[in-house]
């Protein structure tokens, strides 16, 4: 019966029913056939919505707005340039480090790309980097900062999965550092 429900869901998606409607309908059907009371869904949603850790979401957004409007991106680029500007391919490493740090501080990838992309993309174009490489590096490094604490997606995942936030923060550091080193090496050889 479950296989039939999954096939029906796929058929509904193929004929153009919005995906969220199909997933919601399939979930409700599976809850109903599984003997789970639908009020349990409402209770769990209320529990997650009243978690005190969710205060971090608007505060991250506000901090990101303040950082982007304060001129911090330009100062962060100047600092990175002073520290890493001597490297061959240093501009790509500067872009990588700056975007990763800014995303970690603001918790928003889109904000990082908007705030820093307008500054770094012309600089990388002037530095004779191909445009495709520059765009790829900026978008990749903008999302890379989400692995470093304090990361908003990790906080939300910890709430939903009922995992300790500090453990997720620690778990994100090693892959984040590895990816920064790997992308820096790629940028230097470019």
Image (tube, grey):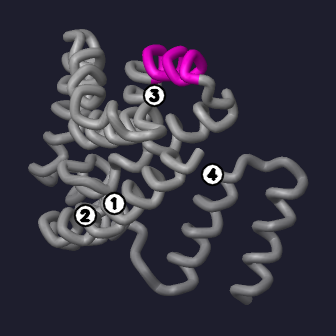
Work out which residue is located at the far right of the displayed protein and give it: 15
Q: What is the C-alpha distance between the residues marked 4 and 3?
A: 28 Å
> Which quadrant does the N terminus fall into?
bottom right
Quadrant of residue 125 in the image? top right
The tag earlier along the polypeptide, 4 or 2, is 4
Q: What is the C-alpha distance between the residues marked 1 and 2?
A: 5 Å
Q: Which mark is residue 20?
A: 4
Q: Residues within 10 Å of mark 1 (few under 14, many from 20)?
A: some
Q: Which mark is residue 176?
A: 1
Are the two marked residues, 4 and 3, in contact with CB atoms closer than 8 angstroms?
no
Q: Which mark is residue 113?
A: 3
Q: Secondary structure at mark 3?
A: helix
Tag 2 residue: 173
Task: Reply above or below: 8 against 177.
Answer: below
Q: What is the C-alpha distance between the residues marked 1 and 3?
A: 18 Å
The tag earlier along the polypeptide, 1 or 3, is 3
> Which quadrant does the C terminus fall into?
top right
Q: What is the C-alpha distance between the residues marked 4 and 2?
A: 33 Å
Are the two marked residues, 1 and 2, in contact with CB atoms closer than 8 angstroms?
yes
Q: Image check: 19 left or right of 58?
A: right
Task: Reply above or below: 132 against 47.
Answer: above
Q: Residues within 10 Å of mark 4 (few under 14, many from 20)?
A: few
Q: Image check: 164 left or right of 2?
A: left
Quadrant of residue 77 in the image? top left
């Amino acid at each position: 019966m479950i296989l039939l429900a999954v096939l029906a869901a796929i058929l509904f998606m193929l004929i153009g029913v919005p995906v969220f409607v199909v997933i919601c309908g399939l979930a409700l059907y599976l809850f109903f056939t599984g003997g789970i009371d639908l009020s349990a869904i409402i209770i769990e949603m209320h529990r997650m919505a009243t978690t005190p850790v969710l205060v971090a979401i608007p505060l991250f957004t506000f901090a990101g707005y303040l950082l982007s409007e304060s001129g911090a991106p330009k100062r962060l680029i100047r600092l990175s340039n002073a520290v890493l500007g001597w490297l061959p391919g240093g501009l790509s490493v500067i872009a990588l480090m700056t975007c990763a740090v800014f995303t970690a501080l603001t918790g928003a990838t889109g904000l990082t790309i908007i705030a820093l992309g307008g500054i770094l993309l012309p600089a990388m174009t002037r530095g004779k980097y191909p445009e495709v490489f520059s765009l790829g590096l900026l978008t990749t490094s903008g999302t890379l900062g989400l692995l470093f604490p304090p990361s908003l997606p990790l906080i939300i995942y910890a709430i939903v999965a009922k995992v300790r936030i500090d453990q997720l923060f620690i778990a994100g550091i090693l892959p984040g550092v590895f990816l920064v080193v790997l992308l820096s090496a790629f940028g230097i050889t470019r």
